[in-house]
Image: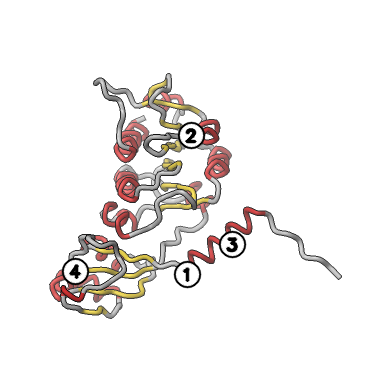
Amino acid sequence: MKTGVKKPAWVVDKERGERRDARETVWLFGLHAVRDALENPNREKLRLVVTKNALDKLEAAVAASGLAPEVVEPRHFDVPIDEGSVHQGAAVEVKPLNWGRFEDVCAAGAGLPLVVLLDRVTDPHNVGAILRSAEVFGARAVIAPRHHSAPETGALAKTASGALERQPYLKVTNLSEAMEELKAMGYILIGLDGEAGVTLSDAVTAAGGRPIGLVLGAEGPGLREKTRETCDHLARIPFGGGFGSLNVSNAAAVSLYAATRG
């Protein structure tokens, strides 16, 4: 009698994540985020709750989506989003987007050969702003670990101002292993560190036109030791004043600009 072969831990974790993603739904809110989700043919949409006023503003997008809206009075707008969220009378329940295989997106996806990697950046507003900048500068993907990262939420989508529907946001099981895969594809990985001896522009120039991965850590702790060790270079954003610290989303925007100018 044959005994089953035990699956590696990373395979088990990946399968659990896929099953969890299949069950998970997200509520997006706000006119802009809801309109972009309704107009995205790749977004699986389950339920739409709107006020009459919001429906009037979303009429074309609702008609194109084929989703039957639930029209409610403003005082009866009851959907599971954070209290105090500015929903503007519109919310849609959706499934998280599936962007495909990490390897395929990073090796040959749309956009420039440029990706952003986030090491435990958990604030949805920061990640939303980073997705928006990544889209503006034509990056191929924003990559984060499956755990200890900002999930796809209504707050993130609202800050991303539509970019969540268009900019790949890839979750990986292990960030350092994903970084090694990127290096095997030919990417040069530049970690942002305020105390690095090399400037970001010099690091971009040294990449010599090769694909670039910009690696940013959480505010405060910065890059973890393993992440730092896996980078090809550590670089700093030069500053002229006495205070040299940028919000992580601002640092991402500056870094993306520098990478596309190199």
Residue plotted at (53% across, 50% down): 103
Quick one: SS at disc 2?
strand
Residue plotted at (42% across, 35% down): 221
- Marks 2 and 4, how far apart in space? 43 Å
Instruction: Residue 159: give x, y in percent of width and height.
Output: 27, 52
Specify the quadrant that holds the N terminus.
bottom right
Looking at numbered disc 2 in the image, what kind of residue is underneath it? Leu
Looking at numbered disc 1 in the image, what kind of residue is underneath it? Arg
Asked whether disc 3 touches disc 2, contact meaning CB atoms under 8 Å apart, the reply is no
Residue plotted at (40% across, 51% down): 150
Q: Earlier in the sequence, mark 3 or mark 2?
A: 3
Which residue occupies the foreground of this view, 219 or 202?
Answer: 219
Q: Earlier in the sequence, mark 2 or mark 4?
A: 4
Seen in the picture, residue 154 relative to 181 is either above or below; the reply is: below
Quick one: SS at disc 3?
helix
Q: Earlier in the sequence, mark 1 or mark 3?
A: 3
Residue receiving disc 1: 23
Which residue occupies the foreground of this view, 119 or 162?
Answer: 119
Q: Earlier in the sequence, mark 1 or mark 2?
A: 1
Residue receiving disc 2: 189
- Marks 3 and 4, how far apart in space? 37 Å
Looking at numbered disc 3 in the image, what kind of residue is underneath it? Glu
- Marks 3 and 2, how far apart in space? 28 Å
Q: Earlier in the sequence, mark 1 or mark 4?
A: 1
Residue receiving disc 4: 89
- Say whether residue 205 is left or right of residue 16: left
Q: Residue placed farthest to the front in the image?
A: 83
Looking at numbered disc 4 in the image, what kind of residue is underneath it? Gly
User: Residue 230 falls in which quadrant of the image?
Assistant: top right
Seen in the picture, residue 31 relative to 74 is either above or below; the reply is: above
